[in-house]
Structure formats: C-alpha cells, structure tokens
Amino acid sequence: MADFDGKPVRLFLWHVPRTISTALTKCLSGIDGMDVWFECFTYCGVTRRNYELATGEVMPMEYDGNEEQAQQAASIVGRLVGCKVHADRIMYGNVKPRMEASTSKYMVAKEGCAAFPDEKSRKYIPTGFKHVFFIRDPYRVFSSFRKAMYDHQVSVGLRKGDAIDEKAFDLEKDNAIVPSSELFIDIHDVWKYVRDNVDPNPIVINSDDLLANPAEMLSKFCHLTGLPYSDSLLQWDASPDITKTWEVASDEVLEKAVPFYGTALYSSKFQPPKPPVCKDRVAPDVRKLSEASMPYFEEMNKFKI
C-alpha cells in the first residue's frame, strides 16, 4: 500500500459519458476516509443551461438572495432527470465552499465536462485538487450514450407516442440535458483551461485501458494521485448502499437514472472491454457525432498515462 504523508488528497475527475467513471467512483469509495461528491457541479451547469433556455433569463450563480429563481430552475431540471432536485444544491456559489470545507482524508469529485462551460462558471472550480480526465473512443461513447439517453427519456416520460420508436431518436437533436455534439469539445476545452490555469500536469486516462488492465492502471493512478493502492480495489461490494454516502444534487438521482448508472451501481469489479464498435453498423447520429469528436479525443489520448 502506498505511503500517506498526512496531506489530504483531493481529486477532480472530469469525464464524458460512458467512460466507466461511476464504476471507478464506487471502487474508490471503498478507501477508508473517502468523501465522494457526485456530479454536483454538473447539475449546476445543466440547471443553468436549461433554466436560461426555458426562461430567457440569466441564471444567478449564488443561492442567497436568488432562492425563488433557484427553485424554479430546480423544477425545470427535475422534469428532465425525473426526480426532485434540491434548489440549494444546484448553485455554484453553494457547492464550492461546501466542497472546499471538507475535512476528509480523501475526496473524489466526479464531474461531467459541461460542469464549467465558461469563464463565469470556472471561477467556482474549487482549489487544492488534482485533475484527472477520463476519455474513451467516441464510437464507444456515443453508441452507449445513445441507448442510455433514449432509455432514460422513455423512463421519465419525455418520449411518448410516435417518439417511442428508438429508430426515430436522434442523439444530436433529442438530448435535452446537454448538447451531445459538444461533449468532446467541452472536455477538450476544459482540459486546456486546466493545464493553462489550474493544474499544469492533469492526468488523462483512456477508460478502455482501465478495463483491459485494471490492476496496472489503478496502481499507476493511485501512485500519481496519492491515493493508497491495494489489490482490494480490484473487487468491491456489489451492493449500491455505499452510494447513499455520496453528496448529490438529488437524493433520488442515482436510482432514477438507471439507464446511466444502474450497471455501475451494482458492479463489483471492472469488466473486460467489449469488442470494438463496428463503425459500419452504428446509427447515423452516432457516426456523425463520433467523426466530429475524434480529433479532440485523439489529441487528449496522446497524453494518456
């Protein structure tokens, strides 16, 4: 097991969807003294975007003094995710000081690439964190994300009638939560911002490497971040109970978003990667999004550990 020098370890895990980040978060939850913050800033970003689209008004960044707008925004995003969202947990100005005030030995903050889309929001990136970026081949990402997003929209009642036909679903046009076409653009942009302004040597991990060689990759990851490594990280309890200790924007978000998180929440180890996606057989929207995203993925992939 790696030595611990007494300093707290703070990790910011950036990801695009379907990069095994939730399973890794559950894996790391087993480390004694770990504090997990699950997509809290991501909900700030998603809420802000959808509030401004729905109302035409500028979303405030602080909760105090803007409680009415925060509640309206929470209702808007709650309909998209299918559960009640707490208004005081989706405001940048509330999340940052709470996160920075943690006294835990270890902390992992797992965040989507849309959490901090611009300079206004990036002022709220918490200090004292090592930054890690999770990427994956875009064809794998979008093939899996398309299925998860379609299933989620059906489960929360956003697709009914003729729209229930999965063939009619277009991941580029019908993703109401975050723009699918911007996922890799966003993570690439944040990666460059972090390198230039926050952490000059952020870690980049290709999720397929983690699945193919979990012992090697976890050992390397822990060595670079200061987390303690042992082979016990390769197997964990399949029960999702540990997730009840995570800080979240909604107490129901994990159980309601089964298409996104269900497999990971009941996982007990990293499964070997599936065969490569057959590019000739993917849906047209997946092919278009993957081809457009490939240059951003390829540049970041050159820096993977």
Image (spheres, rainbow, N blue to C red):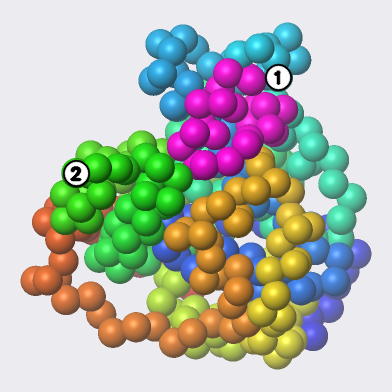
Residue identified by numbered label 1: 63
Q: Position of residue 37 (x, y in %)?
A: 70, 51
Q: Indicate whether residue 89 is drawn in magenta.
A: yes
Question: Where in the figure is residue 81, as x and y percent of width and height?
Answer: 50, 42
Nearest the camera: 54 or 133?
54
Q: Is residue 128 visible?
A: yes
Q: Is residue 249 left or right of residue 263?
A: right
Residue lying at 27% horizontally and 64% vertically, measured from the top left: 143
How crowded is the residue under tag 2: few (<14 C-alpha within 10 Å), some, or many (20+)? few
Is residue 211 positioned above or below 293 on the image? Answer: below
At 61% from the left edge and 14% from the top edge, which residue is drawn? 69
The residue pinned by badge 2 equals 162
Chief SS of the magenta region:
helix
Residue drawn at 59 percent across, 88 percent down: 215
Kind of residue at disc 1: Tyr
* Whole-percent x, y for residue 18 in the image: 42, 63
- Span colored in magenta: 70-92
Q: Quadrant of residue 10?
A: bottom right
Closer to the observer: label 1 or label 2? Answer: 2
- Front residue of 145 and 259: 259
Viewer-proximal residue among 52 and 220: 52
Looking at the rendered structure, the kind of residue marked 2 is: Asp
Q: Residue most toward the left?
A: 280
Residue 47, compared with residue 11, is above or below; it is: above
Distance CA(mark 1)–CA(mark 2) = 40 Å
- Is 254 within the magenta? no
Residue 9 location (% of width, % of height) = 77, 60
